[in-house]
Amino acid sequence: MNVADVLADKRVLICGGSGGVGKTTTSAAIAMGMAARGLKVAVVTIDPAKRLANSLGLTELGNEPALVDPKVFAKSGIEMKGELWAMMLDAKQTFDEIIDRLSPDESTRDEILGNRIYQELSSAVAGSQEYTAMSKLYDLDRAHDFDLLVLDTPPSRNAMDFLDAPDRLTNFFEGRALQLFLRPTGLATRIVGRGTGVVFSVLKRVTGVDLLEDLSVFFRALGGLIDGFKERADQVNKLLADPQTVFLLVTSPEREPIDEALFFWRKLKAARMPFGGVIVNRVHHDEVPAGDGGDIAAELAGELGDKLAAKVAENFEDYLVLARRDRENIDRLAAKLNDDRLLLVPSLDQDVHDVSGLERLHRYLFTSEAGRRKLLEEAAA
């Protein structure tokens, strides 16, 4: 498996997986590699730790793509033939932009954006990030001339909410509860008619907030945007299922992240979403047979002394235990997938936190299986 081959005819790449498996840095390394090959690429992260900005030598990322200076890559020996753009999703701002785009006029837009109910609900909805992430991806796909969009997603079980977000939003707008509020003689009117208006009046006197008016304005204004939200959700669904979109899953070789990857894969399969393969990060390779620790201790005793040599041999045996565990888990993953689309990236001796680290990760992602074996041999030499 080679990432460049997977993305040969794609315009959208969505990287999914559990947290802590290197999904953000993998997304950045893939975007960097494709840009180096001459494409105009945008990478979008919703990672609150802002690791992507640090990896690209930037102090921060905004809610719109920013061009990364090619000089950043030249220092690590990477010739940037294309362009790499990067951004970090501001979910609340993105949701406000959707309201701005769907509102029929400035008055309606200002009425909604300034409404207290909207401000609270949009923060709660946008805080989940799923719908706004897909909406931002959709806007970038429609409004810009990028050759490739790379999206780093939330941890995988939230990412399933991410996949379902457009349908959930449509179901909300079509739901009976909201329709009751939107009807002129609906639930809101009946609530007030039952005397709850007295409660709202007391709240207004105590807090200065006219909650009833805020509710009335919010639902009245929202009613005019429902068709726009539903149409947008349909377009987002089409983008997810488009043949030029592909999902790559990122995991580590531990049991729990692999279970998460399999969970995500089953959901993709059930939804008939385009699946490109699995990248397994931080793999311990068992190139040397177990049980050789005693020989290592004997060989090193002359230079290190018996005590230190024994500790080195013990550490080596511990590594082999991890390697065997990784191999068993990866074999289980391959058997479940019944697929050869697995790309193994070794456990690097340093954490990937800068462009130099991305370049090292990039080497494994963009070479052949034979090339990866050669890299491993060189690293072990």
Image (spheres, rainbow, N blue to C red):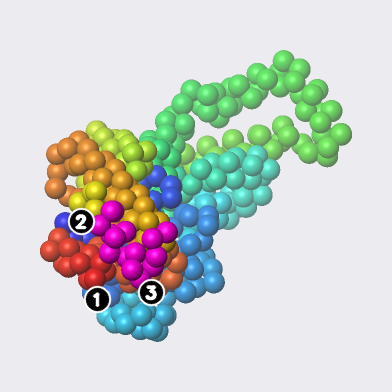
The residue most toward the right is 206
Kind of residue at badge 2: Glu
Q: Which residue is mark 1?
A: 38
Q: Is residue 122 left or right of residue 274?
A: right
Q: How packed is label 2: few (under 14 Cα within 10 Å), some, or many (20 or more)?
A: few
Front position in the image: 178 or 306: 306
Asked whether the viewer can see residue 374, the reply is yes
Please, is residue 83 above or below residue 184 in the view? below
Please, is residue 234 above or below residue 181 in the view? below
Q: Which residue is mark 3?
A: 356
The span shown in magenta is 293-307
Closer to the camera: disc 2 or disc 3?
Answer: 2
Asked whether the viewer can see residue 29, the reply is no
Q: Earlier in the sequence, mark 2 or mark 3?
A: 2
Which structural element holds mark 1?
Answer: loop
Q: Which residue is mark 2?
A: 287
For marks 3 and 1, give the CA distance: 20 Å
Front position in the image: 188 or 21: 21
Please, is residue 246 above or below residue 80 in the view? above
